[in-house]
Amino acid sequence: EEITVTVRLFASLREAAGADRVDVSLPAGTPVGAVWGHLPDPVRGVGLPDGARYALNHEWTLPGATLRDGDEVAVVLPVSGG
Amino acid sequence: EEITVTVRLFASLREAAGADRVDVSLPAGTPVGAVWGHLPDPVRGVGLPDGARYALNHEWTLPGATLRDGDEVAVVLPVSGG
Amino acid sequence: MILLTPDPLDAAALVAAVADPDHGGTATFIGTTRREGGAREVAELRYEAYEELAEAELAAIAAEAEARYGARVAVAHRVGAVAVGEPSVAVAASAGHRREAFAACRYAIDALKARAPIWKQTAYADGETGWIDGCAAPRPAAAGRPA
Amino acid sequence: MILLTPDPLDAAALVAAVADPDHGGTATFIGTTRREGGAREVAELRYEAYEELAEAELAAIAAEAEARYGARVAVAHRVGAVAVGEPSVAVAASAGHRREAFAACRYAIDALKARAPIWKQTAYADGETGWIDGCAAPRPAAAGRPA
């Protein structure tokens, strides 16, 4: 069984994707931390840096959280605001 | 030999004197710290609080500094600005 | 007051937002884009936020600082291009006394820099750009990067 | 910028006075008259300065903070009546990074409160007044005080 989630991308990942969000299809039960492997090649080519975190539907989450159909997951790169 | 100095007064001392400066005549060689005893009775009645300091001609000085004719000496009460 | 905005920051509005007649001190911090002096001159910074989460995180940081220090805290951050010398971030914190006001302000700006999902891209005067987001490669090398 | 003034303080002018394209952070402190909440409500504060020495002392404090922290520092203090909620003192300090900006700002306000020859008279809502200058007697008792 497949589900579809939207992945929000920022900064270097957004530029590599050419879009600030991509929809990906995954097996039901996929954990948040596995979404990276389903992203388009240009995004994965950038590499996932140490310290990246995840958010699920606009709240912080952990890589082990289970994705559901329609979820919005964000790859939150190490931040540099201020 | 007598000299005349101007004493600047602030806050409670100014109000007790009814003026922000008073001229006092003193023996030549009087130290700054002795000027208090020459101030008008209503000023001395307030009492000189612990922590009071002195300035001589708009610079900090010590009680042992010698007064000269025409000097301006200030009794600097414990401060409370801010 | 929690604000993500493309417009110039108004520090006075933040100070007004934390005003309280029982608070005797207000500390503010304003972060501005530096020219950087050294090898490469910076033309501007460009900020990008994960807006939904950034607003929630800034609100959480302000609430933490308020609870820890008995303070009122306001935070504003620019998004988009910010020229050298212009404020990119502003924090205001009021409290009964200055120790708590300074501590709350410092807590909020430190936490913002550590946790808020906002990213900075440096645009140099020579035309190059680089994201500060933990990703290794500068943009000019992107073409040769393995996919 | 060192200022003793009977006019309302302009924090933005202080921030502008310490602006520097190589300084990435500006910390400010604004001290405001508190209502005091407790037993007696405060109507206003009245500040009196030994102006010649106060200006020199504030300039010395700013120079010390600048030298210690590599900062630029501006200080302004009101004289005369200041209503509850209005700023009586403002300090701005810019530096390369926020740690030094906060430290310079904190140094300047702490030193100002300890050293600047400025005195505060509290005017209570019930009409009484009292100088905070180390002299023991409140004004209503003055008539009975031995000369």
Image: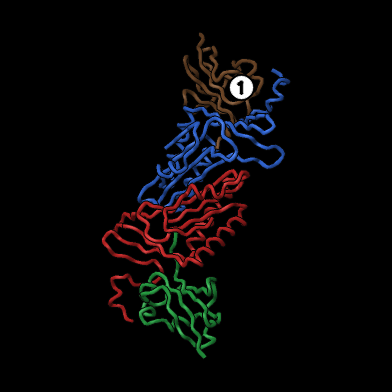
Chain colours: A green, B brown, C red, D blue
In this view, C16 is above or below C121: above
Front residue of C95 and A50: C95
Outermost residue, bottom side = A1
**In this rendering, does residue C30 appear at all?**
yes
Position of residue C73 relative to residue B73, above or below, is: below
Residue at which label 1 appears: B15
Outermost residue to the top? B1
Q: Compared to A59, does C76 lie above or below?
A: above
Single out the residue that lies furthest toward the right: D144
Q: Residue at x 65, y 30 (%)?
A: D130
User: Outermost residue toward the front?
Assistant: A70
* Pointer 1 chain: B
Q: Position of residue A33 (x, y in %)?
A: 50, 80
* C144 to the left or right of D80: left
Residue D128 coordinates in the image, percent (x, y): 68, 29
Which of the pair D60/D77 is nearer the observer? Answer: D77
Q: Amino acid at mark 1?
A: Glu
Q: Is residue D134 above or below residue D64?
A: above
Instruction: Give the quarter of the figure containing the C terminus of chain A.
Output: bottom left
Question: How many numbered callouts?
Answer: 1
| Viewer can see residue D67 | no
Residue B60 coordinates in the image, percent (x, y): 49, 28
Label 1: how many Cα within 10 Å (few below 14, some 14–19, many 20+): some
Which residue is pictured at 41% across the width and 49% down the height? D95
Q: Nearer the viewer, residue B46 or C14?
A: C14
Element at badge 1?
helix
The residue at 58%/40% (across/down) is D85
The x and y percentages for residue A44 are 39, 80
